[in-house]
Image (cartoon, rainbow, N blue to C red):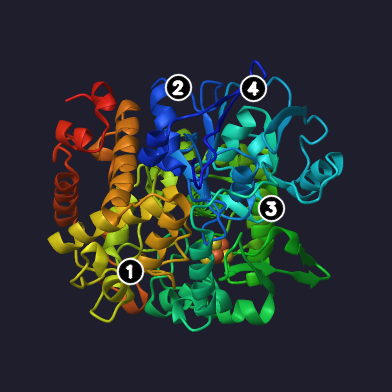
Amino acid sequence: MSFGYNGNILHIDLSSRKFWVEHPPETFYRTYWGGRALGLYYMLKEMKPKIDPLSSDNLLIFSPSVITGAPAPAMPRYTVCAKSPLTEAEGESEAGGWWGPELKKAGFDALIIRGASSTPVYLWIKDGKVEIRDARNLWGKDTAETQKLIREELVDDQIRVAQIGLAGEKMVRFANIVNELKHFNGRNGLGAVMGSKKLKAIAVRGTKPINIYNKEKVNEIARKIARRVMENPLSKDLRELGTPAVLRGFYEAGCLPSYNWTTGYFPEGEKLCAETYKKTILKKTVGCYSCPIRCKRVAEVKEDNLFVDPTYGGPEYETIASLGSICGISDLKSIAKANELCNKYTMDTISAGMTIAFAIQCYQEGILNKQDTGGIELNFGNQEVVLMLIEKIAKREGLGNLLAEGSYLASQKIGKGSQKYVHQVKRQEIPMHDPRIKTGVGLSYALADYGTDHMKAPHDPFFKDQNSVGLREMNGLGILEPVSPTDLGEKKVTLFKLLDIYWTLLNILGVCDFGYVPRSLGTLDELLEIIRSITGWKTTWFELMKVGERSINMSRIFNLREGFTTQDDTLPAIFFRHFKDGPLEGTGAIDQEQFRKALRLRYQLMGWDPDTGIPNHGKLIELGLEWLMGEKEE
Ligand code: SF4
């Protein structure tokens, strides 16, 4: 008997409109556990190298984990994987909400979608039954309307819908996928892959509980954690101020990414802080399946000239910076509107804001002119321009059609030296955390297989001194010594190798990074006990960390097949320069030679060749990946 998982993986071919169910053995589930690890297994086995990510050859995989759906705290997430149309590398993105648990309750552990439909369709999955349904009436509709129409058509208002909006349909390269209108598989443009398959939505409904090995124990730990939410300063902060709480520290220190990263000094930062948010636009906080923290914001604005619909949630920190300070905007209401539009059309707000800021800087430097922009004057700080460009990108109209390619490809088309205003790693626009004050984050940016990402590892300040939560709560993983956030020596590299593996594991398991140490209140012991109680497997941190490491090696091999090299493990040039003004003026530049040495050491710690970054045979054998030997060149 299996616990935690159903033993059913649903395969769907949209070209032939056929589907079938695979029943892998327990060893498969215990080797890959779900999420990106499961997705990469199918991508490496079934996808040919160098395919066009927007062709029917791409696979689109929706994958919760073997523990998703249990009534345990902060474990609602599932991963979507495909070859990314933004990066052309392994693509993945995780979302919370309710959709992942619902898919498990509907009887499936993952969906593997291949081919492409010739006309718009949506999938309807209920308690083990599957239908491919006509979605021509939904194509072009925004997400709230689509969800409403699907629920009406199927006469069930508890159906969970993962879907794309207009940007996905138009294959904007940073289009995302949303469930419950507020929870996003945000990065890597996976909504464009869904659009290329003419798959508008996946509606799921499950009424069967997940089979759990020791439900009493799971409930007992869940109750214990829920009682501590308002006692623990980190989870209390998340509940009361959400992710925008971090903004004040960056603004006051002078490292809030602003004006397309030309400065970290944003004098109007107070207007963007979480306290201002709470006083002005916050309507309520909401959460995800079985999570006591409820950290997500819902914003509302009701003014004569500006209405922000709370249906689409509210901006998180990344959005406030990327559609705010990065574009020179300090009006939270306008940022909330920009967030609403991106969410309604399903576009990643980080890439959208960064691509718009890139265009503004090109215009200011004389690289773009009014002829290129269709007569629009592009200025930092102009909120109307930002809102207009979001509309144009989602609809691929005028300049929006170029920007819908993302800043990297847009700059390749523009030329004229515009490339120096693009800030990306592996073609994905960088998130809103400056690696000059957190070098571990810099290593994670450079090494993320799916393009730069701020959620690849916990951030450096959690490990800065003996009193830091990382040191107090994570010594069970061997973390015993603090390391300064700006250090880039051997101890930092070793620490971040471990942390990358740990957070990759959390992503695979669908565990929210905000639910457990070091970011929040659940302890390592509680997490391990929950995993054991759901699955009945007498697992250990040793086995679990190998699961994370295995998937990192799988994505490394996937990207090697696609032609990526160590040259792609890098940081944008701006981070090798000092802050130019504000409190940090004249400081901060990352030493290029030290960074290069840190990467070489990291490859060695991973069991990869220090020159080529290719995993060695011994490492692949250790991780049970000998089946990938032929996929790498040495
Ligand atoms: S901590 Fe926040 S994002 Fe994470 S599961 Fe809970 S409500 Fe969702």
Disc nearest the viewer among 2 and 4 = 4
Dot 1 or dot 2, earlier in sequence = 2
Q: CA distance from mark 1 to mark 2?
A: 42 Å
Q: Which residue is labeled 2 in the image?
A: 51
Q: Is residue 595 left or right of residue 431?
A: left
Q: CA distance from mark 3 to mark 4?
A: 24 Å
Q: Which residue is labeled 4 in the image?
A: 14
Q: Which residue is labeled 3 in the image?
A: 180
Label 4 crowd bin: few (<14), some (14–19), many (20+), radius 10 Å: many
The amino acid beneath tag 3 is Glu
Dot 4 or dot 1, earlier in sequence = 4
The amino acid beneath tag 1 is Lys
Q: Which residue is labeled 1 in the image?
A: 580
Dot 2 or dot 4, earlier in sequence = 4
- Label 1 residue SS: loop
Q: CA distance from mark 4 to mark 1?
A: 52 Å
